Image: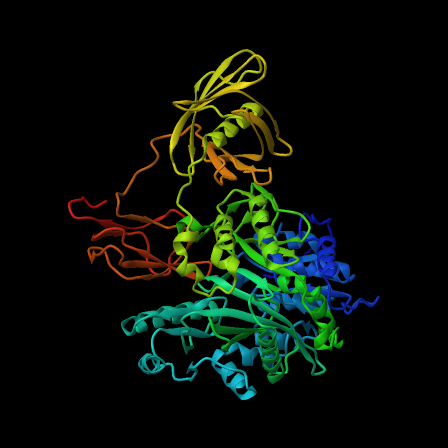
């Protein structure tokens, strides 16, 4: 049952992404006029979303004196957007289908709270034409385009026909209604391989498959249709010629209800993994002014062809090494990467959304006055493990300290102490860096990534850093194949060894903190005076174990042996527990580092970040290290099912089981497909053998670490 009990207004914690920070960043770079009449366009709006985008909208509303209403699921009752809003209402259970996708529940809150307009954010109901109609029927202004435009652009096949009629260049392919697999295969043969299968109602990289050869077509088609049905409740697909070396260039457009439309220039989003954007930047590097103008004009044509109102993005694919570009799709909402456009134009796009939705003219009608200045790059920071094929991570944010500084903007929906839930996208934040030119913006991004501190779960920060630092990206103009071409260059190893200095700093931190735990240690405890010995067992991310011995000296210094032949004598320093910072002199070198101590499964984990510009722990690039001090471990570590055991890498649902118990399988055969975070994850047989057991069936919900199946290799006994 829908709960319409409001959460009372409370003081929001504005650690990052706050209105004051956003305003100073935006309007210091402004090249266009942002109107700010004294009377706001609406007194109160509802934000039908969660996370960082809900917080982003609230930031602008606070500046404009517009009151905000948040909705939340049971899992989000303590979320940042709930804390920031003036009112908040629970609308259902933790799964999106039970809360954020319940259109009637969302609108009931809008009516009850007196909100006159609704901002859909992105995802969830933002591109749902029926929801836009329902808003209008119930007298709530939908802050987006007309439902007709959503329908036209939501169908990839229909949108291509409209674009062709409007004179917008489109990729050759098949956009017809005949969805018979045999017919689709025939059309794929006509288009030629490689061919791209795309969900007609798809977006965000979901419902998309690249088919390299004909014999894989039907299997990939089935997988694409299944994912599309799960994500969009529609399994229709289209086919497109696959461009071999395309760049992803998109254009921000804006229209009003008076028939006007302008563009706010282009962005380049070519660095993608599984069609999900990793780095986005504005303006796109290496384009001539004439080509920029052609992109903008084509995007405005697209907007006017569907009577577009509000913020939208027209995406194009541009064949690398040429000036040839084709319409890809139109996103009828504010994009995740909109901040880079805001930074280079100085325009608050959310303010424009509010004003246009209230019936005002576009704040700027003269296209020539909308210019760009400087360069901005955005990196999406996710809770995921790049060393384990980017498996989404969940857990508790024990420590969260984002970077700060001039031209650095962080958009986030979480705070230190929050949990990253299995129910939603595992994004921690968007990190946006602005500077006078592209080279300077890249350097600022790289330094900011080094300053980003997260403890509690793995993140993609090391991966993003490698991408941004790569010579090909620095040169500009990379294609969407960047991560395939340079996969080895940007790969993150499974485990990273910590330097001797890092181990010494970790030991000093624990000595100064005077808390180490009880089990698993040798010798006496830490003493405040006199020479005492403490022997601890440590291991780093590589799994390498090492005995570290610490002796305390009468003068307050320590001798620390971190390896058989490495002893650091007379180590001095202090640990500030409140600031989580250690300052030390080790091996006659001074170090200043963030040092965060956390508990994980009975162990103590010390996470270290160098806090001296350009200085690393080992002199060879190690600015971050993690050292685990082993504590009491009960038992022998659990049972093992042998080399053929496959455990679930995350919570999720089994959507396909391709073999039965007793079947012979080869290493690499896809035994099971797991769905998590709305993405499919194939699970392969780790060895040749016989499928000895199955831990679940199609449709079963499974937990992280649950045994899914066991393959018994020849000569082994079944588990």
Q: Nearer the viewer, residue 595 or 220?
A: 595
Q: Nearer the viewer, residue 213 or 395?
A: 213
Quadrant for the N terminus in the image: bottom right
Where in the figure is residue 328, as x and y percent of width and height? Answer: 50, 75
Left or right of 382 on screen, residue 347: right
Where in the figure is residue 554, as x and y percent of width and height? Answer: 57, 12
Can you name the residue that lies furthest to the right here?
A: 38
* Image height of 43 relative to 652, above or below: below
Where in the figure is residue 65, as x and y percent of width and height? Answer: 79, 61
* Image height of 182 relative to 96, above or below: below
Where in the figure is residue 248, as x and y percent of width and height? Answer: 51, 69
Residue 151 seen in render: yes
* Image height of 341 relative to 184, above or below: above
Quadrant for the C terminus in the image: top left
Residue at (67%, 79%) from the top-left corner?
261
Q: How many marks?
A: 0
| Location of residue 435 by image quarter | bottom right
Left or right of 311 on screen, residue 178: left
| Location of residue 63 by image quarter | bottom right
């Amino acid at each position: 049952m829908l709960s319409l009990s409001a959460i009372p207004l409370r003081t929001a914690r504005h650690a990052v992404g706050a209105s004051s920070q956003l305003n100073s960043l935006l309007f210091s770079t402004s090249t266009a006029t942002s109107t700010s009449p004294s009377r706001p366009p609406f007194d109160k709006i509802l934000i039908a979303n969660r996370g960082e985008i809900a917080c982003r909208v609230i930031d602008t509303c606070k500046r404009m004196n517009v009151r905000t209403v948040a909705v939340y699921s049971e899992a989000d009752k303590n979320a940042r957007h709930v804390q920031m809003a003036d009112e908040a209402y629970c609308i259902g259970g933790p799964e999106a289908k039970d809360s954020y996708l319940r259109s009637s529940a969302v609108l009931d809150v809008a009516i009850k709270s007196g909100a006159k307009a609704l901002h859909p954010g992105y995802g969830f109901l933002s591109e749902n034409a029926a929801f836009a109609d329902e808003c209008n029927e119930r007298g709530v202004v939908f802050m987006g385009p007309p439902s007709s435009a959503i329908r036209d652009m939501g169908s990839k096949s229909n949108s291509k026909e409209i674009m062709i009629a409007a004179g917008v260049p489109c990729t050759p392919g098949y956009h017809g209604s005949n969805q018979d697999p045999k017919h689709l295969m025939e059309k794929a043969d006509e288009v030629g391989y490689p061919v791209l299968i795309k969900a007609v109602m798809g977006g965000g990289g979901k419902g998309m498959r690249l088919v390299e050869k004909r014999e894989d077509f039907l299997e990939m088609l089935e997988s694409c249709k299944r994912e599309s049905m799960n994500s969009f409740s529609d399994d229709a697909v289209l086919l497109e010629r696959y461009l071999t070396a395309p760049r992803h260039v998109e254009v921000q457009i804006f229209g009003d209800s008076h028939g006007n439309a302008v563009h706010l220039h282009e962005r380049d989003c070519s660095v993608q993994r599984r069609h999900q954007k990793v780095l986005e930047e504005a303006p796109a590097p290496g384009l001539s002014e004439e080509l920029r103008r052609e992109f903008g004009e084509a995007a405005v044509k697209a907007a006017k062809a569907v009577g577009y109102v509000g913020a939208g993005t027209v995406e194009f694919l541009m064949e690398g090494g040429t000036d040839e570009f084709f319409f890809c799709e139109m996103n009828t909402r504010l994009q995740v990467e909109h901040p880079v456009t805001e930074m280079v134009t100085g325009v608050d796009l959310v303010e424009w959304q509010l004003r246009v939705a209230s019936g005002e003219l576009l704040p700027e009608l003269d296209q020539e006055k909308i210019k760009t200045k400087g360069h901005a790059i955005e990196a999406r920071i996710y809770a995921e493990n790049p060393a384990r094929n980017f498996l989404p991570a969940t857990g508790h944010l024990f420590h969260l300290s984002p970077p700060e500084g001039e031209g650095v903007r962080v958009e986030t929906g979480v705070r230190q102490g929050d949990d990253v839930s299995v129910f939603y996208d595992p994004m921690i934040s968007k990190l946006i860096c602005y500077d006078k030119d592209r080279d300077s913006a890249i350097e600022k991004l790289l330094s900011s990534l080094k300053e980003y501190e997260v403890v509690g779960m793995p993140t993609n920060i090391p991966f993003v850093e490698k991408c941004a630092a790569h010579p090909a990206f620095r040169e500009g103009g990379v294609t969407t194949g960047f991560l395939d071409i340079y996969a080895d260059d940007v790969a993150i190893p499974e485990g990273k060894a910590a330097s001797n200095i890092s181990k010494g700093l970790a030991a000093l931190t624990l000595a100064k903190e005077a808390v180490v735990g009880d089990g698993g240690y040798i010798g006496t405890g830490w003493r405040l005076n006199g020479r005492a010995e403490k022997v601890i067992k440590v291991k780093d991310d590589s799994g390498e174990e090492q005995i570290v011995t610490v002796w305390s000296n009468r003068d307050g210094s320590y001798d620390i042996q971190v390896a058989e032949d490495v002893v650091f004598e007379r180590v001095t320093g202090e640990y500030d527990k409140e600031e989580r910072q250690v300052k030390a002199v080790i091996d006659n070198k001074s170090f200043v580092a963030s040092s965060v101590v956390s508990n994980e499964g009975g162990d103590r984990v010390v996470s270290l970040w160098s806090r001296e510009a350009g200085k690393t722990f080992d002199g060879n690039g190690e600015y971050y290290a993690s050292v685990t001090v082993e504590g009491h471990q009960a038992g022998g570590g659990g049972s093992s099912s042998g080399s053929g055991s496959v455990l679930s890498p995350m919570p999720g649902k089994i959507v396909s089981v391709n073999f039965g118990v007793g079947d012979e399988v080869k290493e690499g055969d896809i035994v099971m497909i797991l769905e998590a975070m709305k993405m499919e994850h194939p699970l392969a047989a780790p060895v040749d053998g016989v499928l000895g057991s199955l831990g679940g069936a199609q449709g079963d919900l499974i937990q992280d670490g649950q045994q899914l199946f066991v393959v018994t290799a020849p000569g082994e006994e079944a588990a």
